Amino acid sequence: MPAESGIAEAAAVLRSGGLVAFPTETVYGLGANALDARAAARIFEAKARPSFDPLISHLADAADLPGLVGAVPPAVAALVARFWPGPLTLIVDRPAVIPPIVTSGLDTMAVRVPDEPSARALIAAAGVPVAAPSANRFGQLSPTRAEHVVAGLGAAVDLVLDGGPTRCGIESTIVDARGDRPVVLRLGALPVEALVEAVGPVEVRQGSSGQPVAPGTLAAHYAPRTPLRLGAAAEGDGGRRGFLAFREPPTGGGWAAVEVLSPEGDLTAAAARLFDALHRLDATGVTEIVAEPVPEVGVGRAINDRLRRAAATWR
């Protein structure tokens, strides 16, 4: 259904324990009532997501946070005031009202307010926090269009709200600001530089080989069905491989398919097109995708992070 006209019906689905895929500014989320353990369990089942990987809970407004978690640490409150609504997920202590399945048994909870009007309208209409990881099969490419959700999850979702392509194209940045210095647990659409400008020095600590402390931090993740590796634009191999370029297509021939993220060299635009371009390459039937890293600055760090995790899946 169109996102604007489907809010009431989608909210009713959430209140009844169903699953709704909806657009945010980052990627499409697979939402369920975060207060309903059975509904949250349906997310793990639909995505084939391991139970040890926690979910992000979404709120309609920053003012809803104290009512859910109680006292908010000053550093967390400062980041809320600066960046919500927006692509920043914060780690807080899990309140008793949130079932442990939502946080995979952790005593902490990941939470954010999305910067997408239809998403906030949906959460407000449902009247509950909405647990929502990306609306895709676990470990695969995140969806940035409604058709990606339908192709990946099909009838496992009760309702899909179509809001067109997402604006940011990659997931939120996750930060734990409860201690002396904020810790970035997952690079994302909010650049580290913006955090440093707002709060001073931060620590970047990401990747997990055991139980993740935040969603989307496993070393192997975000992968297409086609094997992917990082590399430069060398010659193709007779038209069997695809190439993901940052600014310019490869000069050598022999590539079966080529996607260019941003001819202008705009990293924000490249991030917005990343998963969509990988979905298209994945659908061409190539035997391998070679992805060119982008400059390691700003949101480029998050793009390279996603590419490295995708490549790790195939290593």
Image (tube, rainbow, N blue to C red):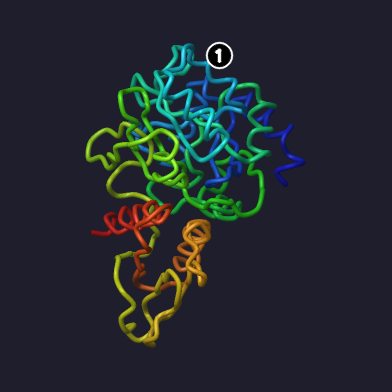
Seen in the image, is 189 located left or right of residue 108? right
What's the residue at 39%, 44% (across, down)? 192
Nearer-the-camera pick, 199 or 295: 199
Q: Is residue 235 above or below residue 78?
A: below
Q: Pointer 1: what residue?
A: 67
Q: Is residue 113 above or below residue 250?
A: above
- Where in the figure is residue 262, as x and y percent of width and height? 50, 68
- Where in the figure is residue 303, as x and y percent of width and height? 40, 56
What's the residue at 55%, 38% (across, down)? 86
Name the outermost residue toward the right: 5
- Where in the figure is residue 285, as x and y percent of width and height? 43, 72
- Where in the figure is residue 121, as x and y percent of width and height? 69, 32
Nearer-the-camera pick, 29 or 226: 29
- Callout 1: 10 Å neighbours few (<14), some, many (20+)? few
Quadrant showing the C terminus? bottom left
Q: Is residue 62 above or below residue 288?
A: above
The answer to which image quadrant residue 29 occupies is top right
The answer to which image quadrant residue 254 occupies is bottom left
What's the residue at 41%, 33% (across, down)? 199
Seen in the image, is 15 located left or right of residue 251? right
Nearer-the-camera pick, 160 or 56: 56
Seen in the image, is 53 located left or right of residue 88? left
Seen in the image, is 157 located left or right of residue 122? left
What's the residue at 55%, 53% (across, down)? 144
Is label 1 in a helix, a strand or a loop?
helix
Nearer-the-camera pick, 6 or 300: 300
Disc 1 marks a residue whose amino acid type is Gly
Quadrant showing the N terminus? top right
